[in-house]
Amino acid sequence: MPPPIRGSARLTRLSAYAFAAIQEKVAELTARGLAPVDFGVGDPTLPTPEIVRRACAEGVERHASAGYPPYRGTAEFRRAVAAWTQRRFGVKLDPEKEICSSIGSKEAIFHFPEAIIDPGDIVLVPDPGYPPYARGTLFAEGKSHLMPITAANDFLPDLDAVPDAVARKARICWLTHPNSPTGKVAPPEFIERWIGWCRERGIIAASDEAYSELYFGDEAPRTALEYGREGVVVFQSLSKRSAMTGYRIGWVAGDPAIVKLFEKVKTNVDSGTPWFIQDAAIAALSDEKHVEGFRKHYRKLRDRLVTAFEKAGCPRSEPEATIYIWQKTPRGVGSIEFAERLLDPKIAAVTIPSAALRSSEEPERPEDAYVRLSLVPSEADCERVARAIEKHLKV
């Protein structure tokens, strides 16, 4: 008899998602011939800009016999990132030492702890937050210390709440800026304080800035790199900025010593981002017109849905950035229950309850209950759901 197949201890420690019941309800509605509108996964449905698609197609022919690409990205790609960073933020980066390409930001964030921590080391992780922060830490045999992201702390990590004993063992502190899922844009004074706090304790300040270009106010979000590169590393992506989720292209930039450590891991994990994808990314970085159009599109959907929830009697929940609405539930209503209400056949909107996005095993407090809506359905579907919320949502 062959030995039983079992997963690793790391895999068995991964928790199941709390919205299994919601998925069952979706399947039930679909089986009844209804068509729920999916606000769940944050995957843009807007077409990738023509300038990007054209550069990609031309790149396929240009690099027909190119072989493996450079692990850290082509010189042209790294120069394009440096040029864009200087235009956008006024920060000058050395393309040779301070920039490394990545296969989107997800793989970079997941693998980054492998370059930095040893077993038992601590990584400070926002909660709720992007799952690869904690899961990459788990696979690197580290421990996550969760920093609650709540309205009470203005959706920013409470650095003063991190115990000294934890901070002494911490090697990485993650900041999502703008924040996913809450849409909070960290003010410059907080970013500066966060970096200073990390430097004082010898902790790497890791800033996930994948949503930096999708903002709704007059002032654009800043980058952590504006406050120096020592001990600072930024993770960027073109997935949301340029609707390039399927292309898998991003970069890591900052302290050259940190970037070098990441590069060493990368050479052992993958064989680099394809040449033609990097050509597409260069084209995307050269054009801001499509980004401005995306911002207008997402703001229109945001405003319509925020207004609909408010008219239905829910607290006004207006994000400053990202492609998400972090909608506060009515008083006394849990996030899973509220998500189920939105699945009523008269509304049929698929959302993600905040309980599904939290890493903490403690019960969700009513004041921290939200649902996340990704602004990715069509404008027509968003309008239909908005009208249904105004008419049928029972608060």
Image (tube, rainbow, N blue to C red):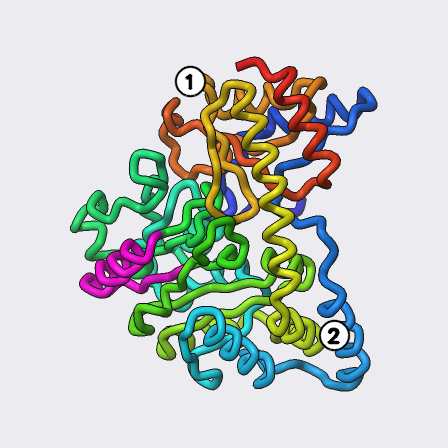
Residue count near mark 1 (Cα–Cα under 10 Å), binned few <14, some 14–19, many ≥20: few
Q: CA distance from mark 2 to mark 1?
A: 50 Å
Earlier in the chain: of badge 2 and badge 1, it is: 2
Q: Is residue 75 magenta?
A: no
Quick check: 334 left or right of 297? left
**Image coordinates for residue 135, horizontal then vertical, percent:** 46, 50
**Image coordinates for residue 169, horizontal then vertical, percent:** 23, 56
Disc number for residue 331:
1
Label 2 belongs to which residue? 55
User: What residue type is disc 2 on?
Assistant: Ala
Answer yes or no: is residue 13 visible.
Answer: no
**Image coordinates for residue 166, horizontal then vertical, percent:** 22, 50
What residue occupies the far top of the structure in this picture? 394
Q: Residue 171, located in which quarter of the rendered image?
A: bottom left
- The residue drawn where x is 40% and y is 75% is 91
Q: Residue 61, located in which quarter of the rendered image?
A: bottom right
Secondary structure mostly seen in the magenta stretch: helix
- The residue drawn where x is 54% and y is 82% is 79
Quick check: 153 left or right of 373? left
In this picture, is 23 found above or below 235?
Answer: above
What residue occupies the far left of the structure in this picture? 164
Task: Report the span colored magenta.
Answer: 187-207
